[in-house]
Amino acid sequence: MCSTTKASDLFEHAFSDTYARYALPGMAVAIIEDGKVVYQRTEGELAVGTGQHINPDTLFKIASNSKAMTAAVLARLVDQGKLEWNDPVTKYLPQFRMNDPWVTRNMQVRDLLIHNSGLGLGAGDLMLWPEPNDFTRRDIIAGLQHLKPTHGFRSHYAYDNLLYVVAGEVAAAAGGAPYDVLVRKELFEPLGMTRCQVGEWNREKVGNVAQPHMRTAAGNVPIREDGAIVPDITSMAAGGIRCSLNDMLTWMRTWLSPERQPAWLSAEQRRAVWTAHMPMPVSARMREWDNSHFSAYGYGWRLSDVDGVWKVAHTGTLAGMYSSVILLPDRKVGIVILINGEGEDARSVLGEVLTKHYTAPAQKVSVAHYAEAIAREDAAIPAQKRKPDTSARRPATGTELAGQTGRYRDPWFGEVALCMKDDGVRFQSARSPMLAGRVMKVGDRWLVDWDDDSVDAEPWLAFHPATAGTPPRMTLSHVDPDADFSYDYADLDFQRTGGCD
């Protein structure tokens, strides 16, 4: 399949329109056909105002596109005879516990990868994000037993990050080396992904590292910038790998043209990774935009059909970083999008336009077409599902919360303090320092106004009186019903343990 000048013009216009429409700080995009790069472009800065420009070797957080790499490490270990997909997790991690002992005994390695555990959407993610925090992978494994399921085991799809962290620890136990060492050994080195980084690394030595941004009234500003040493983060196997555009081109070629690396992974394991293991809902958008009829999760990849064409893809989302990998295996086409700003809609519309060029070229869709479609979706959201107006908030007083202040503890998240400080009543997590802010009153309700604006999901606080067998409790819920699911406030159940110092 050859890319014509007309196609290149379409790609160029789509890139330019997306970049301008969504006022992005930086973006890198590439397309391959039959292993050859037919389009590549980078724009923007590593961090706004630095004058350091993004190029094909710039490192981006690929976020949940790391999941396919974790699955690939496990697939390599299966090829090497070091584990089997249907091995029980406890064979490698005897300390592993889910809330239900039967699920603990029956959870297999494969189950860690396909979001069928019975846990709710994003359960326990507050042990991973916002970063930095002091939760370890050992804490993740210990905390799982306290997360109550919302559905039966293997009965329901609900996206999960914690079990990918467990999968990384299973890989380490089976492979005889830490997860980051295995990723380098099994993926980066044999495939020649020379810029990718995992584990602890030196930002100054590696260089050319994009920083995340948030959009403010004054424009894009960097957030959560890396220090000189990038630490080994707990979320590594779920979403902690960084790669460049050139690395992601290599990654896509590896999957689309297996003959280039025939010894890297067996045909059997390639099929296993791209098998539909867990059904997923077909959304209204997928039906309307893509005429999709099926959707499923493989091992670290989402599988679906677009206009009758097989699609293997995944997205990645972290604060101020968005990625997308779209493969059309039967066309030998690969698309990668990397953004270092608030780019959810940008990623969606650009990915759709580029994909449609290959699946339904006669439709001649544009970025504006899909941007308007998203605007219509937003306009149709009912009032009860919209973020309420909380502008009338005011700081809570110690007198108003005299009966509720104190220290509270959740069995997996640990301790928080709700205590008087100079500027009023404050909420402070002991283990996740960015979850700190003032308690505000809105009507007859209470919410936490986080100190750091990049922590963008405010919670309501609700207080529950003591019962015969339970001390006073505090629960949290989202102010914005559409807030990022990784702020899994509903999974928290704090019990009061004492007063303030």
Image: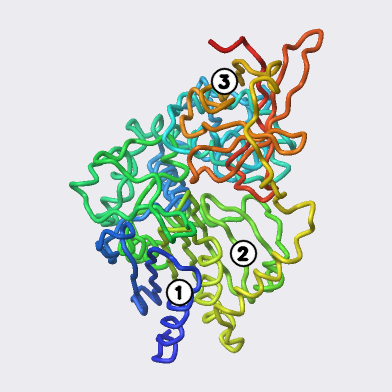
**Residue 161 as seen in the image, left or right of residue 3:** right
Between the residue at mark 3 and the residue at mark 2, the CA separation in whole angstroms equals 52 Å
| Residue topped by disc 1 | 20
Can you give x and y, in whole percent of width and height, for residue 260 in the image? Answer: 32, 65
Q: Which residue is mark 2?
A: 304
Eye-nearest disc, 1 or 2: 1
The three-letter amino acid code for the residue at tag 3 is: Met
Nearer to us in this view, 56 or 260: 56
The kind of residue on which mark 1 rests is Ala
Instruction: Please name whichever residue, 310 or 336, is drawn nearer the observer in this view of the structure.
Output: 336
Q: Amino acid at mark 2?
A: Ser
Query: Which of marks 2 and 3 precedes in the sequence?
Result: 2
Quarter the N terminus occupies: bottom left
Q: Which residue is mark 3?
A: 420
Residue lying furthest right in this view?
468
Determine the secondary structure under disc 2. Answer: strand
Real-space Cα distance between discs 3 and 1?
45 Å
Q: Between disc 3 and disc 1, whose residue precedes?
A: 1
Which residue sits at x=29%, y=53%?
A: 209
Residue reaching furthest to the left: 205
Dot 3: few (<14), some (14–19), or many (≥20) neighbours within 10 Å?
A: many
Q: Position of residue 400 (x, y in %)?
A: 70, 23
* Rendering coords of residue 28 (x, y %): 37, 67
Q: Residues within 10 Å of mark 1 (few under 14, many from 20)?
A: few
Q: Nearer the viewer, residue 132 or 71?
A: 132
Q: Determine whether, in the image, residue 212 is placed left or right of residue 99.
A: left
